[in-house]
Amino acid sequence: MQPHDQLPLHDFIEYSEQAMVLRSADFLKTMQRRHSIRQFSDRPVDQAIIENCLLTAGTAPSGANHQPWYFAAINSSSVKQKIREHAEAHERGFYEGRAGQQWLDDLKPLGTNADKPYLEIAPWLIAVFSQKFSETDGGEKQQNYYVHESVGIAVGMLITALHNAGLATLTHTPKPMNFLTNVCGRPDNERAYMLIIAGYPAKNATVPVHATKKKSLSEIASFL
Ligand code: IYR
């Protein structure tokens, strides 16, 4: 097969318009039940579920289909402990001044602080890495395109897949995040992009009221 060969689109499913209205409304309801949480249960989650969700993320569109992402899925207590130690040390600096007053004021309604016990309690941490360059199968340096856009889409799909599977998540971006490269043993061409915490919510899990207030359609969209 030549690289420019085309395959017929064999798996597109056409629904009736009525079904599409129902499906889109149902999916909206499903996604309106997605909340970032900060109280996780230590209940284990089967790796097979995480694998399916990562494969879902891997179906994301990307610049030139170079798929400039890598996911380190962490279940090991000792690695989670290391990540918590690093993240909390960085967060303490953040909350004790580095953030600046404006940022701290904006975070107040979320009730966050430098303590991140969930980094050890939740069964899975998924460290997401972006690849500005990658290596081809032949060992040559390959330029990647729209890296942030591509990885952002993949992370969105990962969070959606985890929620759809029945898990709760938290997106976490400790600043700086480069310690994740060492802790996860990733190569130089990768940058830590985000940390996704995934698991069951704790029995007493809460959601900040502030986080439930989503903009209305007219605030986020217009029809031209
Ligand atoms: N990374 C910090 C602070 C933080 C920043 C933003 I922007 C948030 O939406 C939430 C938290 C923390 O995790 O506490």
Image (spheres, grey):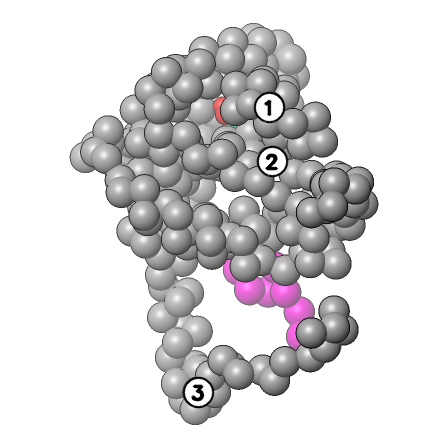
* Total residue callouts: 3
Q: Is residue 175 visible?
A: no
Which element carries disc 2, helix, strand or loop? strand
Instruction: Kindly report the distance in space between the C-alpha atoms of the residues bearing marks 2 and 3.
Output: 36 Å
Which element carries disc 3, helix, strand or loop? loop
Q: Is residue 175 rendered magenta in the image?
A: no
Q: Amino acid at mark 2?
A: Phe
**Residue on which the image places disc 1:** 181
Q: Are marks 2 and 3 in contact (CB under 8 Å)?
A: no
- Where 52 falls versus 189 (above or below)? below
Q: Is residue 220 rendered magenta in the image?
A: yes
Tell me what residue is drawn at x 37 percent, y 45 percent: 50
Q: Are marks 1 and 2 in contact (CB under 8 Å)?
A: yes
Question: 106 or 1, which is in the foreground?
Answer: 1
Q: Amino acid at mark 1?
A: Thr
Q: How packed is label 2: few (under 14 Cα within 10 Å), some, or many (20 or more)? A: many
**Residue on which the image places disc 2:** 129
> What is the quadrant of residue 61 in the picture?
bottom right
Specify the segment rendered in magenta: 214-223
Q: Amino acid at mark 3?
A: Tyr
Tell me what residue is drawn at x 46 percent, y 18 percent: 83
**Residue on which the image places disc 3:** 15
Of the two numbered discs 1 and 2 on the same chain, state the one appearing first in sequence: 2
Q: Is residue 113 left or right of residue 63?
A: left
Give the image location of residue 176, x and y in percent: 63, 20
Give the image location of residue 126, x and y in percent: 46, 35
Of the two numbered discs 2 and 3 on the same chain, state the one appearing first in sequence: 3
| Most frequent secondary structure within the magenta stretch | loop
- Where 146 falls versus 91 (above or below)? below
Question: 81 or 142, which is in the foreground?
Answer: 142
